[in-house]
């Protein structure tokens, strides 16, 4: 396995990967303000317009199961660069689509290409750097990419003031095109193709089955997914829970900025806290903080305290999540022995499926009250804590 560069330019690949993640996730969040205009321009129903969001998520959740093992065989660089180029082309296709069916297909391709590139990039990062450095890098990446759901809608609305809704997709296409040569220059190859095994559907299926049966990995991945579902439910339901007197969502925008700020503070605490506590103890305490935060959120909602106080207590949960998730992801991939591309594809697909399911459940239950959100959140985090402290979920120090 290649060693991480020791020169002053070691940060270039993580920086490029961070930019890639921001651009890819902005393709979902920047698009949200344009949804009513897209519905009008294509002459479709609201449900059909919302399908364009689900198509992106569907592509993001499935394609990694294929591209992960392909990158184990063909190398990370070529597969990642193909994904970034595909993302740029799909974004341009979204802007140029004249029929809604073609637009949906382009959205599916955009989600596929963007997230497959991110997944392959993460596999390289976790191969290239030892655990402490990888956790530090992932914490930095999380602190930046979490801004996408907070600032993405505002950025998309700002673009629409200057150009039609297609302008957001043109901007994303330009971003993807700029990243191709940047990653080609800065990304090291972490796979020795001469020692990689030939692709085999049977072997890949057997490896995925082994990952499914890997109790310790599945337990920790379940913890990650359950905590992540709380964040997704907040994003999906927040505009309804925090509507102002006129029905607008300005209150949610400020609440989301605060919540993302709390998460960022949590990620900044990871590195110094790893100097003070073993990793397993840090994960356990961070998960306890998530539980206390969401329990306090529910209690404040049940007592009908001012929404600002409820939001402030939700920030405690987000602070704990910021401390928890970066080192937890490293612990997840360390619990398996398969090729890193397979491990990363499995973990990333599970997380994307969990996010899509959480959004669907929130929509189906029409979660529009802070009490309902607090109850669902408490159940999710309590289940996560039970998994973390179970026989298979204990995280080694």
Image: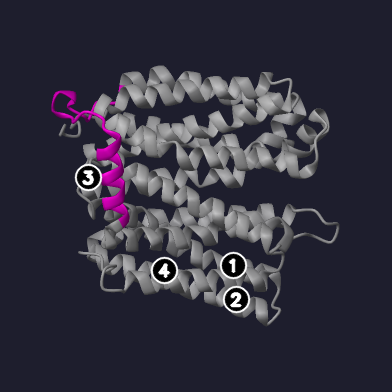
Residue hosting label 1: 312
**Callouts 3 and 2 close, C-beta under 8 Å:** no
Q: Where residue 185 appears, x then y in whole percent?
A: 32, 19
Q: Is residue 154 visible?
A: no
Q: Considering only order in the chain, which callout, 1 or 3, is on the residue closer to the N terminus?
A: 1
Question: Secondary structure beneath disc 2?
Answer: helix
Against 155, residue 329 (above or below) is: below
Query: Dot 4 corresponds to which residue?
Result: 384
- Alpha carbon distance from label 4 to label 3: 25 Å
Separation (CA) of disc 3 from disc 1: 42 Å
State the mark number for residue 338: 3
Q: Are marks 3 and 1 in contact (CB under 8 Å)?
A: no
Residue 233 sits in quarter: bottom right
The residue range painted magenta reads 186-212
For disc 2, the marked residue is: 298
The answer to if 193 sits in the magenta stretch is yes
Distance of label 4 from label 2 (alpha carbons): 17 Å
Instruction: Look at the picture and state if 58 lies above or below 358.
Output: above
């Amino acid at each position: 396995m290649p060693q991480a560069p020791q020169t002053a330019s070691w940060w270039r690949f993580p920086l490029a990967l961070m930019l890639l993640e921001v651009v890819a996730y902005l393709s979902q969040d920047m698009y949200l303000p344009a949804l009513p205009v897209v519905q009008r321009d294509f002459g479709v129903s609201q449900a059909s317009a919302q399908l364009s969001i689900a198509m992106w998520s569907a592509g993001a959740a499935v394609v990694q199961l294929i591209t992960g093992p392909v990158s184990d065989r063909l190398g990370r660089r070529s597969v990642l660069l193909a994904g970034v180029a595909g993302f740029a082309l799909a974004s341009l296709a979204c802007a140029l689509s004249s029929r809604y069916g073609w637009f949906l297909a382009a959205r599916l391709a955009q989600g596929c290409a963007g997230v497959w590139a991110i997944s392959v990039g993460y596999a390289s990062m976790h191969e290239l750097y030892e655990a402490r450095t990888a956790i530090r890098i992932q914490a930095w990446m999380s602190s930046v990419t979490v801004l996408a759901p907070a600032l993405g809608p505002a950025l998309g609305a700002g673009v629409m003031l200057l150009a039609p809704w297609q302008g957001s997709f043109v901007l994303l296409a330009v971003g993807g095109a700029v990243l191709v040569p940047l990653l080609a220059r800065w990304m090291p190859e972490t796979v020795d193709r001469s020692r990689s095994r030939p692709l085999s559907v049977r072997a890949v299926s057997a490896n995925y089955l082994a990952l499914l049966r890997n109790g310790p990995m599945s337990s920790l991945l379940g913890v990650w997914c359950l905590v992540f579902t709380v964040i997704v439910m907040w994003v999906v339901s927040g505009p309804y829970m925090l509507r102002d007197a006129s029905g607008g969502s300005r209150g949610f925008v400020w609440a989301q900025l605060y919540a993302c700020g709390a998460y960022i503070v949590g990620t900044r605490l990871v590195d110094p806290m790893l100097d003070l506590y073993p990793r397993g103890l840090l994960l356990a305490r961070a998960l306890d903080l998530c539980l206390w935060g969401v329990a306090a959120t529910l209690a404040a909602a049940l007592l009908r305290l001012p929404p600002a106080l409820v939001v402030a207590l939700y920030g405690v949960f987000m602070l704990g999540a910021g401390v928890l998730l970066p080192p937890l992801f490293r612990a997840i991939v360390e619990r398996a022995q398969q090729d890193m591309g397979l491990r990363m594809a499995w973990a990333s697909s599970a997380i994307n499926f969990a996010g899509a399911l959480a959004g669907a459940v929130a929509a189906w239950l029409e979660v529009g009250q802070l009490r309902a959100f607090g109850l669902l959140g408490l159940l999710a985090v309590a289940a996560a804590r039970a998994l973390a402290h179970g026989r298979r979920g204990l995280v080694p120090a």
